[in-house]
Amino acid sequence: MAEIILDKVTKRYPDGALAVSDVDIQIADGEFVILVGPSGCGKSTTLNMIAGLEDITSGELRIDGDRVNDRAPKDRDIAMVFQSYALYPHMSVRENMAFPLRLAKVDKKVVQQKVEEAARILDLTQHLDRKPGNLSGGQRQRVAMGRAIVRSPKAFLMDEPLSNLDAKLRVQMRTSVSKLQRRLGTTTVYVTHDQTEAMTLGDRVVVMRGGHVQQIGSPQFLYEQPVNLFVAGFIGSPSMNFLPAGLEDGRLRTPLGDFPLTDRIRRLLEGGSAPREVIMGLRPEHFEDARLVDEPGAAFTATVEVLESMGSDKYAYFAVEGEAAMAAELEELAAESGTAEMADGGSQIVSRLSAASDAREGAELSVWFDPDKIHLFDPSDGRTLTYVE
Amino acid sequence: MSGKELSEGKKAERRLGLWLCAPAALVMLAVTAYPIVYSIWLSLQRYDLRFPAERQFVWFENYVTVLTNSYWWTAFGVTSLITAVSVAIELVLGMALALVMHRTLVMKGLVRTVALIPYGIVTVVAAFSWRYAWDENTGYLTDLFGATAPLTDRAAALGIITLAEVWKTVPFMALLLMAGLALVPDDLLRAASMDGATPWQRFTKVILPVMKPAILVALLFRTLDAFRIFDNIFVLTSGAQETGSVSMQTYNNLIRGLNLGIGSTMSVLIFIAVALLAFVFVKVFGAAAPGSDDGGKR
C-alpha cells in the first residue's frame, strides 16, 4: 500500500525529444488511477518512470514520502503487468508466479502457499504446471496478474494489460481487474489508450496529450466538465459533436440555427472574455427525436444520413452544411481516430435517439436538443468557456 | 471422396514440389552420398596404393587395426581435448562478445565488423601468423613470455593450437549467440527487473534459458567443426610431439601413406564420431524451443 506522488516529473531523451513534461499527479493510497491518451502522449513513459525502467530527467517521484528517483526497480517494491504479459516461456505457470518470491528468498512453503492462493483467486489452479506457451490469451493475462499479486507489492503498474485480448474477453477481464483491485486495495496505476477502459475502471483518470497532463478527475467529472476540446473529444463514445458557432447578444448562432443562451451558460460566460467565434460541443445523448419530447429546447430539421439501431437506442448521423469546427486539438483527435480524411467539407453530427424514434435513413427528422447541455470552447487555445468552478 | 484423400490441385502442387527439389537432391547425391558410400566401401578393403596387387576385401579388419592402435587413440584424445577446451572457452568469450555487440549503442556497425575480422581471415594464413608469433627465433610472443620454442613442447603446442582455434572462431560463436540474444524480448528483461532480479540473475535465469536453443545450435556447430580440426595443427606443428588430431592421422595415412583402406576407415570413424556428437546434442540436451510442456524433447 502506498501513496505515489509525481512532482513536476519530466522526461527528456538524449536526442532532446521531450516525452513527458512537468507532470504532477498525486495518487492516494489504494487508489485506482488511469493514465489515458492517444499513442505518443507520454502515458507509458510516465508509468515506466514510476516503475524505474526509465530515468527521470527532472522532478521528483515519491513513494510513501520517500524520494525514489534513483532507486532500482527491484528496490521500489512495485509490480508491473505488461501488455505482452512478459511471461517467462521456460517456466511453468507456478514458477512464473513464484519467480519474484524466489528472488526475494522467501521460504519455500510460504511461496507455495502464496502462489496457490493467487492461483485460486485468478482461477488458475488447474493450469499451475503448464507452460505459458500452451495457455490462451486470457489465461496468460491472468498469470501476469498473478505474478504481480503474489508478493503483495506497494503498488501495481499496468501497461495496457488488456489490449491483446479480443473484445469480449477484454470486457470480462475489465470487470475482474476492477474487482481484484478493490479486493486487494492496492494502489494501482493503469495505462490505456482506450477511453472506455479509462471510464469504467478508474477512481480517477489522468488525460494526457503530448507529454502534458490535460485534466485529472473522476470519470464522471471529466465527462461532464472537460477543461478543453481535447478532453471533451477524447472522453465519451461516440465522441462529442463539435460545431463552429458565433456569440452575439446572448444568442448562439450555429449551423443548427440560432438560439438564446440559457441563464446558466450566460452566467458562466460573464466572468471571462469570451471571443465572438467559439466552438460548440454537444454530446450525442443530448439530442432526441423532437416528436418524443415536450420540454422546451432548441430544435432543427435535418436528413438522417445513416441510422444505426443498437436495440436499446438508435444512433442517427446528420450532415451539417458549412465550415467544420477548426482547432488543433480537433485535428489531433481526428488523426488519432483515423477520421481526418473523411471530412469532405461540413461536419457530421451523431445523435443518440430513443429506440422509440421513427427516424429512417434518408428521411427528414425534426431533432430536439437541450441548449443547457452545450459546452463552449475557445478555438484559439481549445479551453472551455463553460467550466463550472 | 474421403477427407484424407488429396484434391487434384494439392496433388499437382506436391508433384511440382518434388520436381523442383529433384535437381538439388541429385546434386547432393552426387557430391555427398557417393563419396560417403565410396569411402565406406574402401574402408572395408585392404588397399595400399604402394602395393596395389594386395588389394582385397577384408570386412572390418581395418577397423580392428585402427581401433587397437595407440596412435589413433592418442590423436582421438588430442582432438577431444582441443574440442572440449576450445569450445568451452569460445562459448564464454563468444557470449561476452555477443552481449557487447548486442548492447552497443554507438557505432554498432563498426563494432560488429571489427569483431568479425578474425573470422574473415583464411585459417591457414592466420595459422602461419600464429606460427611466426610463436617461433623460437623470430616470434614476438615467444619473447614476450620468455619461452623457448614453445611449438616443440607438447603442452605449450596444444595450448597454442587451442588459442589459434579460439581466436579464429569466437566471432562465429558470437554471431550465432547474438542471433539468440535478439530472440529474448525486452519486456521479459524489464519484467525480471520488476520482479527483483539483479543483472546477473536476469542473465542466468531469463536470458540463458530463453536462448538455450540458440546456444545449443552454436555449440553443436562449433563442436562438430572443432572435432575435424586440421589446418591449424597442420601449419603450427604438423602433428609433431603427439599433437596431431584424428584428421591429421587420416591425412597422414590417406594422402601421405597412400593407404586408402586405413585412411578411409579413419574418415568413416570421424564421420561416425561427429554423427554421434550431433545425435547426443539433439537428443540429450534437446534442441526444441523453450516453452513447450514436454520439456523441450521431441
Image: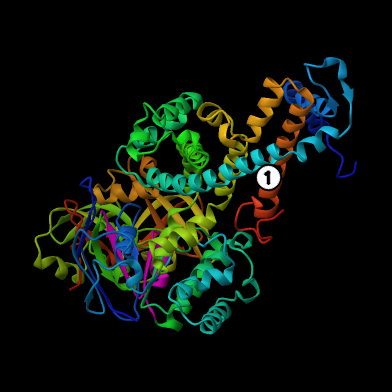
Amino acid beneath label 1: Leu
Q: Nearer the viewer, residue A281 or A229?
A: A229
Q: Does the magenta stretch include residue A190?
A: yes
Q: Quadrant of residue A11?
A: bottom left
In the rendered image of this protein, does residue A20 appear above or below residue A118? above
Find residue A222 and report its image quarter: bottom left
Q: In this view, does A2 lie to the left or right of A166?
A: left
Residue A382 place in picture, x, y as percent:
20, 55
Image position of B144 (left or right of B19):
left
Name the residue rendered at 64%, 38% in the picture.
B75
Can the viewer see residue B34 in this picture? no
Q: Quadrant of residue A43?
A: bottom left
The residue sitting at 48% across, 24% down in the picture is B122
> Where does residue A218 sit, x and y in percent of width and height?
31, 73
Please report the residue visible at 47 percent of the width from the left and 42 percent of the height from the top.
Answer: B174
Does residue A122 show up?
A: yes
**Residue B22 vs residue B38, the one in the foreground:** B38
Image coordinates of residue A73 in percent, x first then y, are 34, 67
| Residue B164 at x, y percent in the picture | 47, 35
What residue is disc 1 on?
Answer: B277
| Residue B91 shown left or right of residue A371 in the figure | right
Report in which chain the residue with disc 1 lies.
Answer: B
Circle 1 SS class: helix
Chain part drawn in magenta = A186-210
* Residue situated in front as seen by the camera: A141 or B8: A141
